[in-house]
Amino acid sequence: MRSLIGKSAPKFSAKAVINGSEIVENFSLEQYLGSKYVVLFFYPMDFTFVCPTELHAFQEKLGEFEKRGVQIVGCSVDSEFSHLAWLNQPKSSGGIKGVTYPVVSDFSKSISENYGVLAGSYKPGENGVWECDGEPVAYRGLFLIDKNGVVRHLVINDLPLGRSVDEVLRMVDALQHFEEYGEVCPADWSKGKDAMKADGEGVSKYLSSH
């Protein structure tokens, strides 16, 4: 699969639910160009078990992302009506009520396909009937997109494996540190720790002090 790192994030215009209650027809990431970073994350399906834990986890840390100028956007292959119903279902009943960031409907599965996270692929079967080889849902893909619309970090988990929201925040901090100071971030770096100048002398100084 071709990696999207360092490339422009695939464009799309799709239906989405915003603010937990409003359906919009032509939601696009282009509205954030030049003003916000975007964390676009895919999840397999509404009304499942692991997925609501992730959507709530992003909501709980939404203030931290907003302080960093980051827009969170969720996406799955469900319809906008399914999203809306799930958003109106209480957390105690397995719903995602209280989630306020946009949740995009990829009902055609084209967004998942273009981002390389569709778990299944379609091919013609017997008698010309198209069949899906694998699950017709999205893997747990996540893309950190900078203000210029370029993908700077991505991770794709298999369906049973939930993500770490704290790790996403760490990657946002690392990108912003590099952009501000021109320093690269070593293994297990976190905000407030020493980074390195991207040259041999800077690396040597960092290693000798650790």
Image (cartoon, grey):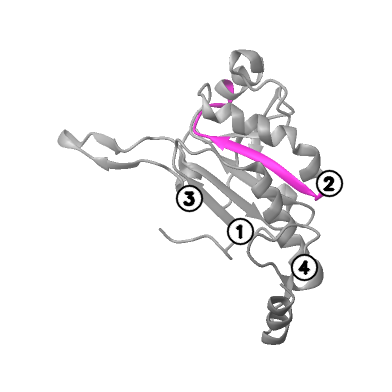
Quadrant in which the N terminus is drawn: bottom left
Residue 120 appears left or right of 128: right
Mark 1 or 2 closer to N-term?
A: 2
Tell me the magenta residue range.
68-81
Residue 136 appears left or right of 156: left
**Whether residue 126 is situated above or below residue 37 in the rendered picture:** above
Q: Quadrant of residue 199?
A: bottom right
Amino acid type for the residue under numbered disc 4:
Asp
Of circles 1 and 4, the one toward us is: 4
- In the image as oriented, which residue stretches furthest toward the left? 127
Of circles 3 and 1, the one toward us is: 1
Give the CA separation, mark 3 to mark 4: 37 Å
Mark 4 or 2 closer to N-term?
A: 2
Q: Nearer the viewer, residue 128 or 88?
A: 88
Q: Residue beneath label 4, please?
A: 194
Give the CA separation, mark 1 to mark 2: 20 Å
At mark 3, the secondary structure is helix
Amino acid type for the residue under numbered disc 1:
Val
Mark 2 or 3 closer to N-term?
A: 2
Q: Residue beneath label 3, please?
A: 114
**Whether residue 49 is situated above or below residue 186 in the rendered picture:** above
Numbered mark located on residue 67 in the image: 2
Numbered mark located on residue 151 in the image: 1
Residue 73 among those drawn in magenta: yes
Mark 1 and mark 3 in contact (Cβ < 8 Å)?
Answer: no
- In the image as oriented, which residue stretches furthest toward the right? 67
